[in-house]
Image: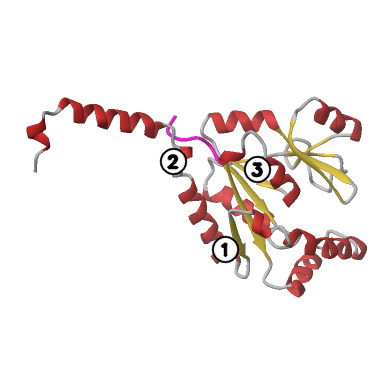
Amino acid sequence: MARRGLLIILSSPSGAGKSTLAKRLMLWDDALSFSVSATTRAPRAGELDGREYYFRSRDEFAAMIAGGEMLEHAEVFGNFYGSPAAPVQAAITEGRDVLFDIDWQGGQQIRNSILGKHTLSIFILPPSIPELERRLRSRAQDSDGVIAARMRKSRDEISHWPEYDYVLVNDDLDETEERLKTIVSAERMRISQQPSLVETVRRLNHEFEERNDDDLRP
């Protein structure tokens, strides 16, 4: 295996741009696989089970937690969300990166999990609070009450920024995308992600041993 896969965690308050950045990252590298979460919320128009989410009842979701099938899970605005563990473990072992578009609670659980040493966590900040609200309203997906609740929650979410490996201010989407791609490219080269380096160094040392002292003198 040339390298191990990364668990790439993107988190932000709703409206800061993490979902758009996640989609752009997927277009940049089609070898990235998106972690499909399970949720107890109802499907929105156009969403399909197994594509956007695994839609499960509350009883089914509880059974998955009890069976140890979730890498992380959290309750958000009255619904449960979580990441099934088995496909993530398989991807990491095969050297494939998995992208997570999750909140700080989920990110914290993954970083504290058995796969934590393979995580790359990035928090996305909005340039301002008025801009955050404008983006939420421009999506035209939620009622005024839901938007107000998301805005109240955003302050708590933003307070968790120091827990992440990197923090990006999404003041320009294209520039933020480029910074994000630079981070991912560099983190793939971490020593911990390249198990083949051990064999490479072993081979180099063996080649040194095959040479006599005269060969090594300047």
Amino acid found under the numbered disc labelled 2: Ile
Q: Disc 1 marks which amino acid?
A: Thr
Q: x, y (%) of residue 144?
A: 90, 65
Q: Which residue is mark 1?
A: 176
User: Which residue is depicted at the point 57% across and 63% down?
Assistant: 176
Query: Within the image, what quadrant is residue 206 found in?
Result: top left
CA gap between label 1 and label 2 equals 26 Å
Q: Does residue 20 appear anywhere in the picture?
A: no
Q: Which residue is mark 3?
A: 111
Q: CA distance from mark 2 to mark 3?
A: 18 Å
**Label 3, label 1: how far apart the Cα atoms are:** 23 Å
Please state the total of marks drawn on the protein image.
Answer: 3
Examine the rendered structure and indicate whether residue 82 appears above or below residue 169.
above
Instruction: Specify the segment rendered in magenta.
Output: 1-6
**Circle 3: residue type:** Arg
Q: Residues within 10 Å of mark 3 (few under 14, many from 20)?
A: many
Question: How far across and down, in percent of the image, does residue 133 sit?
Answer: 79, 69
Above or below, 183 against 93 in this view is below
Q: Answer with left or right where residue 101 lies relative to residue 98.
A: right
Q: Earlier in the sequence, mark 1 or mark 2?
A: 1
N-terminal-most mark, 2 or 3: 3
**Image quarter hosting the C terminus:** top left
The local crowd at label 1, few if under 14, some if 14 to 19, many if 20 or more residues have their Cα within 10 Å, is some
Q: Which residue is mark 2?
A: 191
Tell me where residue 177 appears, x and y as whole percent.
56, 60
Position of residue 181 in the picture relative to residue 108 (left or right)? left
Whole-percent x and y of residue 54? Answer: 78, 36
